[in-house]
Image: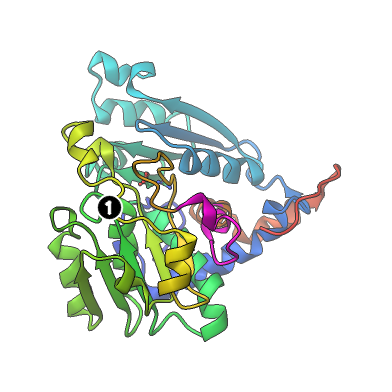
Amino acid sequence: MIFAGSHILSVEQFSRADIEQIFAVADSMEPYALRKRVTRVLEGAILGNMFFEPSTRTRVSFGCAFNLLGGEVRETTGFKSSAIAKGESLYDTARVLSGYSDVICMRHPESGSVAEFASASRVPVVNGGDGANEHPSQALLDLYTIQKEVTAKRGSMDGLRIAMIGDLKHGRTVHSLSRLLALYDNIEVVLVSPEELAMPERYVDALRSAGHKVVISSELNHSISRVDIVYSTRIQEERFESKEAADVYRGRFRLNQSIYTEFCQPNTVIMHPLPRDSRSDANELDNDLNQNPNLAIFRQADNGVLVRMALFAMILDVVGQVEAHSREVNWYHRRNGM
Ligand code: NCD
């Protein structure tokens, strides 16, 4: 695809070659993300960061990625602080805010809302999550993490085995990730969820019709015994009618160190889009995994900055200029590694 000036709304936009291109640009962003160098390549540019659902990582890492490229960020968070609360349409909001920004990131509780907004926007729009539908930048950073954690050891993404666990019905991260994985060869996906929260059929069909193996299970321990990646997710409480309706499923699949030791292969990588629900009745990834070197969740979150920097640099067409606008940092920094 041509990235310059494009919206990023769905992972369906990407081919394998596009993904490789994004990942190569993401790699080149490392000196800036690690604060070894600063670049001002986006000096004067403004990101409109519009988050109408709770967000920590996605909102802040989009903002930091833009800042790290030298741009400024304007945020709107929550419906209450926006004129949408006065009945303004997505169309009008998009027409107005795209006049104030060079690129917009948007998260919204309704499926399809970000695409609707983008169709009225005068600048590129990046989908930061639209309801239970898609979360393309998360899927890219997940795949980038998988590539760094696993394929460096095994050579390629092809033949990867991954267990996706939890609320696969409402989890937009697993929806987008499964579509990206379908672009590779010979993937095995083990889908572990309560029956009522199963992965929607269209995603399962897409994997199977691309020749991949899909195993469906509602039992954790044996589902994680033959995989390279365990990708755990949170029960998406906000998509249920009530907290009580979500409570029924909370805590159904808990991974802790003793289960890991007993059932996983020694190098199985543990991922989660975060936030992990650490309340005692949920606790899908126990804190006793924090010392496990294969717990990749914080490296995964760090990788989000690299991937989002890459997307901005490609959408605003400055990839070739990043270095020319860079210099060493002035300050002492003691951050080691990503
Ligand atoms: C996810 C989301 O918002 O879909 N979080 C994120 O962006 N990293 C997953 C979740 O909220 O459970």
115 relative position to 7: left or right: left
Which quarter of the rendering shows the C terminus? Answer: bottom right
Residue name at image x 60 percent, y 41 percent: 64
Picture quadrant of residue 25: bottom right
106 magenta-colored: no
Q: Is residue 122 visible?
A: no
Front residue of this view, candidates 69 and 196: 196
Q: In the figure, is residue 248 to the left or right of 22?
A: left
Residue 294 counted in the magenta span = yes
Badge 1 density bin: few <14, some 14–19, many ≥20, Cα 10 Å: many
Residue 58: percent from the left, percent from the top? 47, 43
- 6 or 31: nearer the viewer: 31
- Amino acid type of the residue tagged 1 in the rendering: Arg
Q: Nearer the viewer, residue 277 or 106?
A: 277
Kindly identify the residue that appears in the image at 32 percent across and 85 percent down.
186
Against 199, residue 42 (above or below) is: above
> Can residue 113 be spotted in the picture?
yes
| SS category of the residue bearing label 1 | loop
Q: Position of residue 228 (x, y in %)?
A: 43, 76
| Residue position for label 1 | 252
Measured from the top left, where is residue 109 in percent x and y?
27, 36
Q: Name the residue rendered at 39%, 77% in the picture.
A: 227
Residue 292 relative to residue 107: left or right: right
User: Is residue 301 placed above or below 248 in the rendered structure?
Assistant: below
Q: Left or right: 247 with respect to 78?
A: left
Q: Which residues are magenta?
A: 286-301
Residue 136, horizontal then vertical, whole percent: 37, 55
